[in-house]
Image: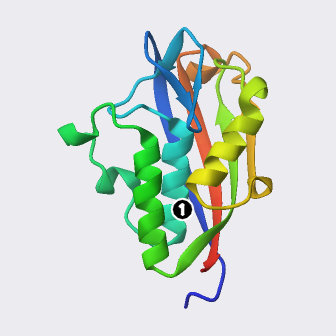
């Protein structure tokens, strides 16, 4: 039944490495480290896609876009978002809201927070006031707290188109 709301959860973790571009929620940050990944490593977009795909009852991002496929090497994660939305529309669904948490020491999100919300809204076809993104530090605990990794957690709510 497509008339009931659907909820999905996505989580993604990437190590941080010197010299990598720092892409977060579709926005490039000026940082000395960036997420290490087969694609551009945008943990927020990866988690958002997984949350949306899960809510729609579709395969996860890793199944749809294998890190073993050379075509996905350094691929912009925005491509994954567009493909995700194509599949969601085919199921007669739309994204109603996204709530995102990014745990990281670097970069600091506040200066680009609104730009990230707007980018996520554009990629997932919803108003910016239905997207939230929060930054959390690791409080010097584990790989995140030591600045070695970042983790994104996203909840998506979907409804009928």
To which residue does mark 1 refer? 52
Q: Residue at 54% x, 8% y: name it.
A: 32
Q: The C terminus lies in which quarter of the figure?
A: bottom right
Does dot 1 land on a helix, a strand or a loop?
helix
* Above or below, comparing residue 91 to residue 69 in the picture: below
Q: x and y percent of residue 88 in the render?
A: 48, 71
Using a 10 Å C-alpha cutoff, classify the residue at mark 1 as few (fewer than 14 neighbours), some (14 to 19) or many (20 or more): many
Q: At 47% across and 45% down in the image, what residue appears?
A: 78
Find residue 8 and report its image quarter.
bottom right
Q: Is residue 71 left or right of residue 94?
A: left
Q: Quadrant of the N terminus?
A: bottom right
Give x and y (percent) for residue 133.
73, 42
19 up-or-down from 75: above or below = above
Color theme of the render: rainbow
Q: Is residue 126 above or below residue 27?
A: below
| Number of numbered tags placed on the structure image | 1
- Report x, y in % for residue 159: 64, 77
Q: 125 or 113, which is in the foreground? A: 125
| Residue 145 in sight from this viewpoint | yes
Q: Is residue 11 visible?
A: no
Residue 12 falls left or right of residue 61:
right
Q: Residue at x 41, y 24 (%)?
A: 36
Residue 6 image position (x, y, % from top left): 62, 75
Above/below status of 106 relative to 96 = above
């Amino acid at each position: 039944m497509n008339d009931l709301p659907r909820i999905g959860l996505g989580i993604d973790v990437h190590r941080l490495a010197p010299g990598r571009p720092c892409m977060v929620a579709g926005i490039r940050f000026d940082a000395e480290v960036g997420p290490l990944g087969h694609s551009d490593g945008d943990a927020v977009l990866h988690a958002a896609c997984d949350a949306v795909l899960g809510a729609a009852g579709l395969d996860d991002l890793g199944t749809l876009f294998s890190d073993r496929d050379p075509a996905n090497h350094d691929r912009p994660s925005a491509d994954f978002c567009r493909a995700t939305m194509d599949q969601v529309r085919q199921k007669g669904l739309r994204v109603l809201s996204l709530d995102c948490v990014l745990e990281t020491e670097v970069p600091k999100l506040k200066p680009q927070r609104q730009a990230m919300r707007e980018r996520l809204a554009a990629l997932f076809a919803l108003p910016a006031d239905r997207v939230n993104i929060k930054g959390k530090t690791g409080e010097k605990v584990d790989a995140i707290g030591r600045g070695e990794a970042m983790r994104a957690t996203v909840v998506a709510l979907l409804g009928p188109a």
